[in-house]
Image: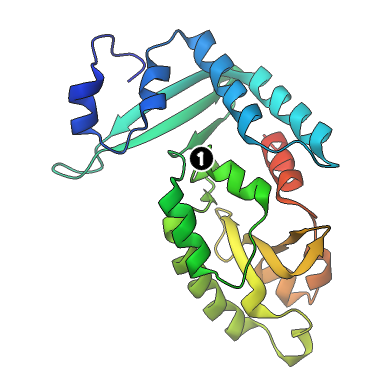
């Protein structure tokens, strides 16, 4: 999209209805402006009134300092299929890239809340969904889209029921909700709905290795989603 100079919103929105109007307008801008405007959007959406505010704000700024290009692409997976739209963050020297899906809309958030009625999702996580509902770097599956959360949760619960024995039940499996998938099978960062840091639930890392080594306590790696996100943006 950003390389096509003669696109018009009216005809394009009919062809690719999933494309946010803001993304379309962003694609009309020069490369440097796309980066500047996108960074400003991140900083406007993410909550910084927390103890981790400086850490996350600095990490976001450092991340965008490494971004060399932001491209917006509309793709058709197969002939006759609906178009999809993607935002690609290319880092300097072509060493890596991040991929973002369109932001969640209010209906997506309401559906997510209904599917997990027993969970108060962290405010910083919900804020990030308004930036990208699905976010990953190169081969990672990444931050799970809201539409896939329930499916991934039930699959992960089946996995846990087979792997966890009675000696490991100090962690309540139904309270473990994956929000990020690694490229490796059954490797997730998960919200743990029974553990709070202040007013927000914490998150922990789960994998077959963690379970096999009976090392579940070590998985409580990030007290907040913001701290996990800052780390994820840094690991390039």
The colour scheme is rainbow
Rendered position, 227 above or below 119: above
Viewer-closest of 82 and 26: 26
- Measured as percent of width and height from the top left, residue 229 is found at 69, 43
How busy is the neighbourhood of tag 1: few (under 14 within 10 Å), some, or many (20 plus)?
Answer: many
- Measured as percent of width and height from the top left, residue 89 is found at 52, 27
Rendered position, 109 above or below 139: below
Tell me: 53 left or right of 129: right
Q: Quadrant of the N terminus?
A: top left
Residue located 46% across and 45% down the image: 104
Which quadrant of the view contains residue 235?
top right
Rendered position, 61 above or below 198: above
Residue located 72% across and 47% down the image: 228
Viewer-closest of 66 and 14: 14
Tell me: 227 left or right of 181: right
Which quadrant of the view contains residue 23?
top left
Query: Is disc 1 placed on a helix, strand or loop?
Result: loop
- Measured as percent of width and height from the top left, residue 103 is found at 46, 40
Outermost residue, left side: 80
Tell me: 178 left or right of 20: right
- Measured as percent of width and height from the top left, residue 81 is found at 19, 45
Residue for badge 1: 132
Residue located 22% across and 25% down the image: 12
Q: Quadrant of the C terminus?
A: top right
Which quadrant of the view contains residue 54?
top right
Q: How many marks?
A: 1
Outermost residue, bottom side: 166
């Amino acid at each position: 999209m950003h390389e096509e100079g003669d696109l018009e919103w009216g005809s394009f929105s009919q062809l690719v209805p999933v494309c946010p109007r803001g993304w379309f307008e962003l694609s009309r801008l020069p490369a440097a402006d796309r980066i500047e405007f996108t960074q400003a959007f991140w900083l406007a959406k993410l909550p910084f009134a927390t103890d981790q505010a400086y850490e996350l704000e600095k990490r976001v700024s450092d991340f965008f300092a490494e971004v060399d290009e932001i491209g917006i692409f509309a793709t058709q997976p197969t002939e006759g299929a609906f178009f999809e739209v993607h935002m690609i963050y290319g880092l300097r020297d072509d060493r890596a890239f991040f991929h973002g899906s369109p932001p969640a809309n209010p209906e997506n958030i309401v559906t997510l809340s209904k599917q997990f009625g027993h969970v108060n999702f962290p405010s910083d996580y919900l804020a990030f969904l308004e930036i990208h509902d699905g976010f990953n770097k190169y081969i990672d599956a990444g931050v799970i889209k809201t539409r896939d959360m329930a499916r991934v949760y039930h699959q992960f619960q089946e996995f846990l029921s087979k792997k966890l024995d009675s000696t490991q039940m100090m962690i309540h499996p139904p309270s473990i909700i994956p929000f990020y998938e690694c490229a490796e099978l059954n490797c997730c960062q998960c919200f743990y709905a029974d553990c709070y840091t202040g007013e927000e639930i914490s998150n922990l890392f789960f994998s077959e290795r963690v379970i096999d080594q009976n090392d579940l306590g070590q998985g409580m790696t990030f007290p907040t989603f913001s701290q996990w996100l800052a780390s994820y943006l840094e690991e390039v």
